[in-house]
Amino acid sequence: MLAILFGALAGFAEVKVGDLLLTAFLVLAPTMFLGTVRPRKPWRWTLLVSACVPLARVFAAFVLHQYTERPQIYESFLVFLPGAVGAYSGHFMRLFVENVMPKKP
């Protein structure tokens, strides 16, 4: 549920601001956080957060009738790259911390 909320926030920023770099950061930070908190299967955080951005762009085009160009819809799919980087870096950061500082019995 939290991943969908983060994705909706990133999608809203993509539609309103239109800055792909800001949107990439708004996808990277939550996926890194979610990958750290729940390191098992980090690809799901990428899918849940990043998929909301193209859906928000398509929603704005068809439902809200907000003018959008076709390349803007295609470029919104680029947020899957920072989403994957964030989720897997959070995953590996968690594994690193668990290996360096193991829990004491």
Image (spheres, rainbow, N blue to C red):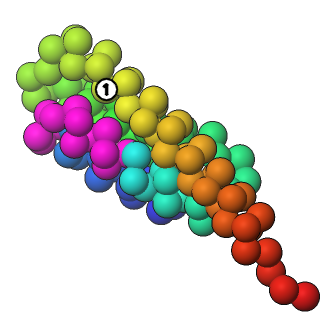
Residue found at the very far right of the displayed protein: 105
Seen at 51% across and 38% down, the residue is 85
**Does 38 appear above or below 53?**
below
Q: Main secondary structure of the magenta part?
A: helix
Observer able to see residue 55: no
Name the spot of residue 13 as percent of width and height, x first: 20, 45
Dividing the picture into quarters, in which one does residue 19 lie?
top left
**Amino acid at the residue labelled 1:** Ser
In-image side of 78 versus 17 (left or right) = right
Observer able to see residue 25: yes
In-image side of 66 versus 58 (left or right) = left
Dividing the picture into quarters, in which one does residue 82 lie?
top left
**Residue 42 included in the magenta stretch of the image:** no
The residue carrying mark 1 is 76
Dividing the picture into quarters, in which one does residue 35 lie?
bottom right
**Residue 21 included in the magenta stretch of the image:** yes
In-image side of 17 versus 92 (left or right) = left
**Does 45 appear above or below 80?**
below
Seen at 40% across and 46% down, the residue is 28
Residue found at the very far front of the displayed protein: 100
Seen at 31% across and 49% down, the residue is 26
Residue at disc 1, secondary structure: helix
Residue range (magenta): 15-27
46 and 82: which is toward the camera: 82
Seen at 29% across and 20% down, the residue is 75
